Image (cartoon, rainbow, N blue to C red):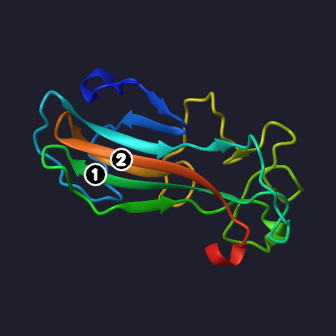
Amino acid sequence: MRLPTLSSLGLSLVALGFVVVVPAAGQARVPRPTITKPTIMPATAGRYRVVITGFATAKETVDTDTDGKRDEVYAAAAVVLWDRRSSAAISQPTVVRTREYGDVGSGRYPSRMRAGAASPSGGLWAGNGSDYAPAEFDPRGTALPPPSMYQLPLMIFEGGLSEGVEALLVVPSLWESDNAQRHT
């Protein structure tokens, strides 16, 4: 499978799994990783935003339910920006991640975001076919709230990329957590 070039993307929306790449308008603040922004972009360059918008529960894990009903999940992504000409990293590898989503346990897990319907206080499970995180996530929708640094939609990258100059490596993942104390 051949990936499209940056110039062929134009202003269209490209979905890569649950990661969405959208050209960003204006000069927004670049979160992690920090990169040098060119003052004049060549015709084959543009500003891009990579965001994990949300996820749906398709299959749950084997869970002990000692830390809330069913699954507690967080999204993460490893990110590194490369110079394609020298094969050297422009930024240090960075991992960004959300807070946990799942059963909030009637306040027992204050750092967790409520998601799912396994109990009145949440918990992600595959039994109803519609457990999403965040709860209002619609995989068919196009309207999104502004991206965040710690919850969904999660800002992965925003900055300038030039064809043949930079390459952005993004490795998205979902993790089930069985130890709420570790991630508070």
Q: Give the left or right position of residue 156, taking residue 165 as reference.
A: right
Q: Is residue 64 visible?
A: yes
**Amino acid type of the residue tagged 2 in the rendering:** Leu
Q: Position of residue 137 (x, y in %)?
A: 66, 40
Q: For mark 2, give the secondary structure.
A: strand
134 vs 7, nearest the viewer: 7
Q: Which residue is mark 1?
A: 81
Q: Residue at x 47, y 44 (%)?
A: 51
**Quarter in which the N terminus is drawn:** top left
Q: Residue at x 26, y 46 (%)?
A: 27
Distance from disc 1 to disc 2, alpha carbons, whole Å, reads 6 Å
Question: 9 left or right of 118?
Answer: left
78 or 106, nearer to the observer: 78
Q: Residue 5's quadrant in the figure?
A: top left
Q: Report if residue 184 is visible in the image.
A: no
* CA neighbours of label 1 inside 10 A, class few (<14), some (14 to 19), many (20+): many
Q: Which residue sits furthest bottom?
A: 181
Query: Dot 2: within a 10 Å radius of its alpha carbon, few (fewer than 14), some, or many (20 or more) residues?
Result: few
- Residue that badge 2 annotates: 169
Q: Nearer the viewer, residue 133 or 2?
A: 2
- Disc 1 and disc 2 in contact, CB within 8 angstroms: yes
Vertically, is 110 above or below 128?
below
Dot 1 or dot 2: first in sequence order is 1
Q: How many labels were placed on the picture?
A: 2
Where residue 12 sits: x, y (%)?
39, 23
Which quadrant of the figure contains the C terminus? bottom right
